Amino acid sequence: MRIDLNADVGESFGAYTIGDDAALMPSISSASVAAGFHAGDPSVLRHTIRLAASHGVAVGAHPGFPDLVGFGRRELNVSADDAEHFVLYQIAAVAGMAAADGVRLQHVKPHGALFNMAVRNAALAAAIARAVAAFDRSLMLFGLPGSELLKAGRAAGLRVAAEVFADRAYEPDGSLRSRTRPDAVFADPSVVVARAVRMMRERVVDAVDGTRVALEAVDTICVHGDTPGAAVFAARLRAGLEAAGVTIKAIGAS
Amino acid sequence: MRIDLNADVGESFGAYTIGDDAALMPSISSASVAAGFHAGDPSVLRHTIRLAASHGVAVGAHPGFPDLVGFGRRELNVSADDAEHFVLYQIAAVAGMAAADGVRLQHVKPHGALFNMAVRNAALAAAIARAVAAFDRSLMLFGLPGSELLKAGRAAGLRVAAEVFADRAYEPDGSLRSRTRPDAVFADPSVVVARAVRMMRERVVDAVDGTRVALEAVDTICVHGDTPGAAVFAARLRAGLEAAGVTIKAIGAS
Amino acid sequence: MRIDLNADVGESFGAYTIGDDAALMPSISSASVAAGFHAGDPSVLRHTIRLAASHGVAVGAHPGFPDLVGFGRRELNVSADDAEHFVLYQIAAVAGMAAADGVRLQHVKPHGALFNMAVRNAALAAAIARAVAAFDRSLMLFGLPGSELLKAGRAAGLRVAAEVFADRAYEPDGSLRSRTRPDAVFADPSVVVARAVRMMRERVVDAVDGTRVALEAVDTICVHGDTPGAAVFAARLRAGLEAAGVTIKAIGAS
Amino acid sequence: MRIDLNADVGESFGAYTIGDDAALMPSISSASVAAGFHAGDPSVLRHTIRLAASHGVAVGAHPGFPDLVGFGRRELNVSADDAEHFVLYQIAAVAGMAAADGVRLQHVKPHGALFNMAVRNAALAAAIARAVAAFDRSLMLFGLPGSELLKAGRAAGLRVAAEVFADRAYEPDGSLRSRTRPDAVFADPSVVVARAVRMMRERVVDAVDGTRVALEAVDTICVHGDTPGAAVFAARLRAGLEAAGVTIKAIGAS
């Protein structure tokens, strides 16, 4: 068994710090770097790309809504055209900064509300896929298994990666349980490892009501980096997976 | 004689419009497209690149200070590192959006206060040149003749283009007369044509006090696009130059 | 008959201009001044307040979503708490700037998507009303007749003003026809005057399908200021109303 | 002896946290609350005002440059008019939000580069003083002893408070040693207490080169809140001052 562990990084902004990316890097194989609209700034972006490269971590662009104060987590009723253009802009900025340091972009993962809206909003999903495909057809697009985003990515001729959230509770319909609920997140690494292994082996996840939710694919596991103790948690998750015989490797690595 | 006519374009933002880029395009050979920090947004950027391409106008990136309300015209005391990174970010965004439409970036021209500060601030000039060179050594860097920016560009191994302002008054030291002065701008196209032709032929410009200012080179003439009547003025400037035997051609064209 | 004519003003931003407020002021009795989040900046705000005062036009705050690039016209899924706080912030800013010039704020009118969402979203409407009431219970709250916003305003002990749009088409349910539809706006001033007079006299408006929509009240008519020719249109609307025997007076004037 | 201890608070923004205001409040007597341009957002602002009020800490407005990514610490070449208007806007916003919770604003303290530029830039200092005076002549204006800001405040008829930095090194000319220097900050609370007491008793401070710098007045001591351990440091500073017989009281308290 082999899996990709990805985390959202580069979310600091100016004098503001979120997460401890340096501590997190040794545990992950892919980094989705905030592209400057919902989080991140050009200096943070460049340092984060260099940090990822120095750890052999694959780099992806993490475009979000132009909503810094909302951290890109609030639904915004953008037109498909505007979404296509601001996603393209953000991918181009991250890819170009990466290229300036000799790093080739591996993937694109929409952030927050943009990611969540693209689960069901086909027009928005198509706009995101158009932006990725227009920029570079070899980029991989991350999305929720069964989402419109992955459908749109495939329709656009992109390789897609089905992302699962081993530390998050699932609803019976395969969506993530809202973070506003107290039981939305699993805090025990051994539980999360067990969930991850089951997801990989059986392509299912148990929803909050006990329903078995089928997962069309399990390509990459999201590790949260913006909570206190995230780096320690990630290290234990990686160690647990490796102990279970799972190899951690970037999704785009041969 | 051959010269490049360049204009700043793509400065509209959301519901806000500046300039009439569609009317201006037929008169220019190079377009410096606002990169989203001092003006422009991703949708405006994409439409402007496509507009330029449809007119056979070469496309450049026009990065500026992160100061939308000040339109990038106010000096901001940024660190050289931050300048390098936000210039790189903006170049990458414009170049990537252009590439998505099959357009290759020709040049980089810093905007407003960033351009003006780089005339004398060697550290800032070097940071800008580093950003351009890190992204793509084949890009041409626009700057004032005699500026630190052109020196830094050459030192970084870049091709540079000396930009003159045929409709602007010059100070004896070769800097542009401040727009806050009533005699900063020439409004008569025939005067501007005569000034442009003299600049090209003799590599000099007469300063406000009559001093002859030597110009190290004259590669591109800036046409202002954000004033009422700018398109008509540009058309008359182009016609006047062509009537004087000058060929208008993008600086990067063979 | 007496009516208030209000317009959204102060929407320029830095180097960007929207509307011709100076030309519009003679035709209106109340001005809703953009508060800096979706449009406007502190310098524009101050000049606009002074301009309104010099024309004897009553001043209101026009708070919007923090979405400058979207001009506050895109729905944003904010929490009620955040909405309360950013509305309060914006009202305070406008009221304080007005007070600095001896002008007392008359009203609050939410802008764009915030206004539209508050037609049906009771929690959002209550948050807006809380902000107004917390700041100054004597402020009048503008909203669509029959909206949750007016209900929430009354429940909070505020005076409310029912705003109608004489130049906009209505849907059978009393909402405004989307501007994306070609028949959303009436361009003929005489038609708009006739619609306005009927609204005032009979408290009804004919919807696009012929349905008669009852209006709970008709206190103020919105005049659009951001379209070309808006000032001329407003002047003709005012003249037409006065010719029909209607007195134009600010809603808060005795 | 009596002194005011003030700190900059409310600098968090959306998902980004700076400082631990709740832990700091018990140690200070005046809070300068970020007004939303260089730091802070409306929700943070409101919570911070309420937090200060619950601790009996006096509230001031802390306006800064519109430079969130630079945290207001970079010099920006604004016009005096623009400065007057954005300072007025920010004061109005904070004062109005405070009033909504029954809190009366005590003071205004410009932030970062705005504060530092107003030490020597008389036009900028006058613009700030005009904004404060236009809003409320009873507000106190904080500034560096000997600064143009305090002069402008007095000239505008305002009460002013001379602010000293007991934990910061001073240059021989009375300015603060740049934070880029390793010896810019004193980390030992007992040293800082001794410096503070000497400042209060003798109205002098020893500059880095041993020069004795005379202080025209010592009204309030700035406590930094944005560094790790700031709350503990502030508590020790307060305890040290009280042990030295100094009463800690808000500058505006009777």
Image (spheres, coloured by chain):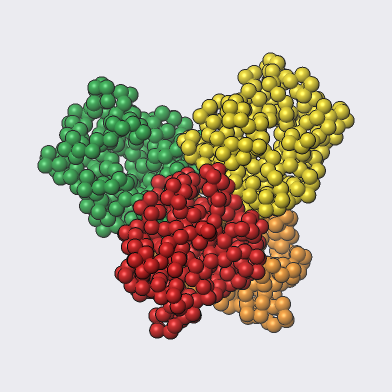
Chain colours: A yellow, B red, C green, D orange
Q: Residue at x 28, y 47 (%)?
A: C228
Vertical position of residue D150 compared to residue A21: above or below: below
Q: How many marks?
A: 0
Q: Quadrant of the N terminus of chain A?
A: top right
Query: Where is the C terminus of chain A found, in terms of image quarters?
Result: top right
Horizontal and vertical percent position of residue C18: 35, 51
Visible residue check, residue B88: yes
Describe residue A106's horizontal placement relative to residue B89 as left or right.
right
Camera-side residue of A70 and D219: A70
Residue B121 horizontal side relative to residue A189, left or right:
left
- The image position of residue C21, as x and y in percent, is 29, 53
Give the image location of residue B154, x and y in percent: 62, 68
- Residue C147: image quadrant is top left
Taking the spot 59% from the left edge, 58% from the top edge, the residue there is: B139
Give the image quarter of residue A108: top right
Residue D81 visible? The answer is no
- Looking at the picture, tell me which residue is in the foreground, B137 or C237: B137
Q: Residue at x 73, y 19 (%)?
A: A204
